[in-house]
Amino acid sequence: MLDLDIIIVSIYLLSMLAIGMYASRGIRDLSHYSVADRSFPAIIIFATLSASFIGGGFTMGNAEKVFSWGVAYIVILWGFSLKEIMVAKIIVPRLEKFRDAISVGDIMAKAYGRPGKLLAGFLAVPACAGVAGAQVSAIGYIFNLFLDIPHLWGILIGFGILITYSTLGGMRAVVLTDVLQFGILALGFPLLFILGWLAVGGLDTLQVTLPAGHLDLFGHMSVVAVLSLFLTFVLGEALVPPYVQRLLIGKNIKHVARGTLWSGLFSIPFFAIVGCLGLFAVSLNADIDPYLAIPYMIDEVMPVGLKGLLIAGIIAVVMSSADSFLNSAAVAFTNDVVVPLKKKNPLNASRKLALARILTFLTGTLAVVFALSIASVLEIMVLGWTFWAPIILVPLVAALLGFVAHPRVLYSSTLAGVSAVLIWEYLLQTPFDIAPLVVGVIANLLVFVSTYKTQREKDSTSIDYQTETQGT
């Protein structure tokens, strides 16, 4: 890596710190730290949502999987795109009555009371730390490859910069940095794709040089496995805390819906572009580490100067995702766990804000543990999702759709989701290539519906009995 590229990367990293310091001015309380001033237009919602989900997993992890398995993984990731479009069309129009919420727990509390709020707050930390850990791990690889810094030190340096601006600036810093990061990735990856396409020699060359099956829809995977993973990406990151927060920072529901829809549509070609980089890499050199597909392409085809810009873009995509999850975990635990449990001795505004900042740092530390424990970025992300979707997704969607239920409905469905995941993965060893997360969500849904119906029937019987008793 030449001096000019190093200078560009250094300028980018210093810019992130400067933005974080600037954004930290004027933060008054937990609400401002978590949702800023709720005044962002559709274009900003689009940019911050896109920058948040396009992290290390959907870039380096995407290219890695396509390198190894072929275009089937591009199709699998489009499950996430479908989810974003569904949220824009189905969920966002129902958010009007939750405009005062600052976290998932605030939404859950309206349907299930205090237990729903506490459950959401407790689960937010491991779920967000898992996804943030995927990004922290990617930062370590980038620093190691391009700056020749050991992986561990790369993680610690990247984490240090990330945690500084996230802790100080809260959601305002996250959104401001997201906009800059989105601009870099929206320009950089298409440019890398064009130069990679030219380097490979086009489709005719790809058909000759790629392994058999790499251009087939299902490639080396069974139809069931592809559909199962597709559903994992539909469900796994659906309505996780950072995305819910993004739905609460818009100036109105129309702006939020447009921004979310644009983000979902943008992800379709973006996932295809990034996945194709994995195909280009295996075509040019099938012997490299699959996880290094994108760094290899940058080294091979990008000229000096542009190489530094794109390396900054790679760092940008992983930081933009990690900072969102760190902020959301801290806000969720402070607002949904600590505040409800401190009713008798409530925290004042300054202490809530200080606690959120401390928890941002602690969640980041847990993310580092995940990053050092699991090698694959996408596998770390799926682990994080497993703490969320099989437990919270069904009750949360029900709350957003206007259902109100006794806490025992929540407890029953939660237990069913967790049990199904554990039994399917560890006892049955994941039969039929169906992902445990999908099984957990289905079990949660079935138990939620059945216990909700039972509750309604009991409530109806009780009301009828009381009416008859009063009549006699």
Image (tube, rainbow, N blue to C red):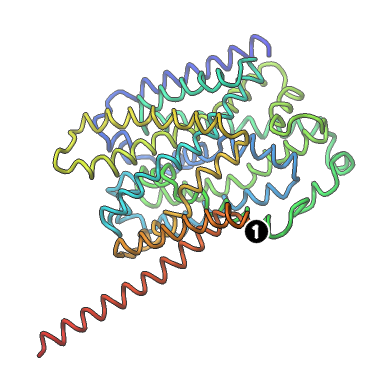
Q: Position of residue 280 (x, y in %)?
A: 78, 35
186 lies above or below 42: above
440 lies above or below 340: below
Query: With 41 as the anchor, is 47 left or right in this view?
Result: right
Query: With 299 as the anchor, is 403 left or right in this view?
Result: left
Q: Quadrant of residue 184?
A: top right
Query: With 256 as the anchor, is 462 left or right in this view?
Result: left
Q: Residue furthest front?
A: 427
Q: Position of residue 430 (x, y in %)?
A: 62, 55
Residue located 77% across and 29% down the image: 288
Q: Residue furthest top?
A: 3
Q: Residue furthest right?
A: 208
Count of marks placed on residues: 1
Q: Position of residue 207 (x, y in %)?
A: 86, 44
**Res 390 seen here:** yes
Residue located 27% across and 35% down the image: 30
Amino acid residing under circle 1: Pro
Q: Report the quarter where the N terminus lies.
A: top right
250 lies above or below 303: below
362 lies above or below 156: below
Between residue 42 and residue 53, name the one nearer to us.
53
Q: Report the quarter where the C terminus lies.
A: bottom left
Residue located 72% across and 19% down the image: 303
- The residue tagged 1 is 431
Q: Quadrant of residue 348?
A: top left
Query: With 428 as the anchor, is 354 left or right in this view?
Result: left
- Mark 1, other Cα within 10 Å: few <14 / some 14–19 / many ≥20: few
Between residue 235 and residue 209, name the one nearer to us.
235
